[in-house]
Amino acid sequence: METSWQLGGKPIRVGVVGAGRGQTFMRAATAVGLELVAICDTWEEKLKQVSDRLGVTSYTDYDKFLEHDMDAVVLANYFHEHAPFAIKAFAADKHVMSECAACHTMAEGVELARAFEKSGKIYLFAENYPYMVYNQEMHRLYQTGRIGEFKYGEGEYVHPDPAEVKLARSCGRDHWRNWIPSTYYCTHSIAPVMYITDTRPVKVNGFVVPYDFNDLTQTMHMKRSDTCSVIICRMDNGAVMKSLHGALRGHGNYVRIHGNKGLMENNRHGDKHRLRVWREPWEKAEGEPTEIVYTPDFPNHHSEAISAGHGGGDFFTTYYFAEAIRTGEQPYLDVYRGIDMSIVGILAWQSALNDSGPIEVPDFRTESARQLYENDDWSPDPKRKKEGQPPSSILGDIEPSEATIAFAKEVWAKQGYRE
């Protein structure tokens, strides 16, 4: 039976890069009319397990993978490697859905924008947090004018874990999770505010809480970056946003939007999917309560979303990717918004290393802005190490102890990884 979002009963043939995180997109593909035809990963053992189970063609060579007969590519590979893979996919005439970050350097952002425009293909930035139910509801309320014009907002992504858990998902000394600076992983906290208010950052100040040598979740992990970061953004409508993300205690995802007519935020206790909307007594309509707290439904595809990962977000990124390909219209989370969010993390790290001074955020929608950054390859990636490249921590280079290295190798071995 053809679903409401299929077109002529013909599925879109898609290949997924990443046999780990990529399985989320593999599971979601069929539900939105996508046909999984190929997967790609360099971890051969894991690749074989997944491909055998799903009965699809597998590749360890990305260039060979791109030669497969398919329409689109989902990039669920490493955080700092998405832009080069997307650019190659565009050159191979494929649509692209990319996990965060969209780019790892300013120069990559420039090259990605140019490659996208040349390709004429669809690009969706698969940032799933805007599509959690309370964020979609805040987006709806904001668009109706419920709280007025956006003035101040907060996005928080706080995610602590025991060292063993973190090591199991970051196998290898130079796995990106072990060296990425604390400002870089910022899209989960920035994206919901941008989506709800339809604004973009134009200036950033970056702050970090340094690496904690008294916290075993850090010292027994191979991580060489700081505890967490706070990024203050000036938005293009004059509003201010605070982004908090990192490994503080107190796991949770929170969004708070102040307008000049009210406030919206998801709950910090109990059911965190519940939404609180506040109107001042002198501004509300007669008979309307000052405060409303309720659990919203997804505006569409509620039953499909509630069973998907990341609070329903994993369903909607795949759904909107399929819709964009069928209609030929770029999705809301397009290449430019993906680049906006991603370069905020880069520029915030430059700010943090420069006493948290303000830095302007260029708009790579314009070629004149791109030309200023087309050779900017500033990066803390150990594989790109050269003079002038930054450290991973505000404290400089941090070396794990011998006990930490031994513990890491033990955990990695359980994952089938040998370094």
Image (cartoon, rainbow, N blue to C red):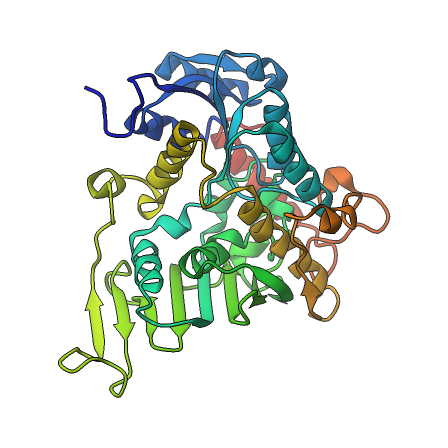
Q: In this view, does 377 lie to the left or right of 206?
A: right
Choose between 101 and 43: the one closer to the eye: 101
Q: How many marks on residues?
A: 0
For this orientation, the residue located farthest to the bottom is 282
Q: Can residue 85 be seen in this snapshot?
A: no
Image coordinates for residue 292, horizontal then vertical, percent: 21, 72
For this orientation, the residue located farthest to the left is 287
Q: In this view, does 86 lie to the left or right of 288?
A: right
Image coordinates for residue 337, horizontal then vertical, percent: 54, 49
Image coordinates for residue 190, horizontal then vertical, percent: 50, 58
Quadrant in which residue 361 is drawn: bottom right
Image coordinates for residue 82, horizontal then vertical, percent: 59, 35
Choose between 130 and 115: the one closer to the eye: 115
Choose between 390 and 303: the one closer to the eye: 303
For this orientation, the residue located farthest to the right is 387
Quadrant where the C terminus is found in the figure: top right
* Above or below 242: residue 140: above
Residue at image point 61% right, 16% down: 61
Q: Can residue 284 be seen in this snapshot?
A: yes
Residue at image point 20% right, 40% down: 303
Quadrant where the N terminus is found in the figure: top left
Quadrant in which residue 62 is drawn: top right
Quadrant in which residue 232 is drawn: bottom right
Choose between 186 and 219: the one closer to the eye: 186
* Above or below 108: residue 254: below
Residue at image point 22% right, 21% down: 2
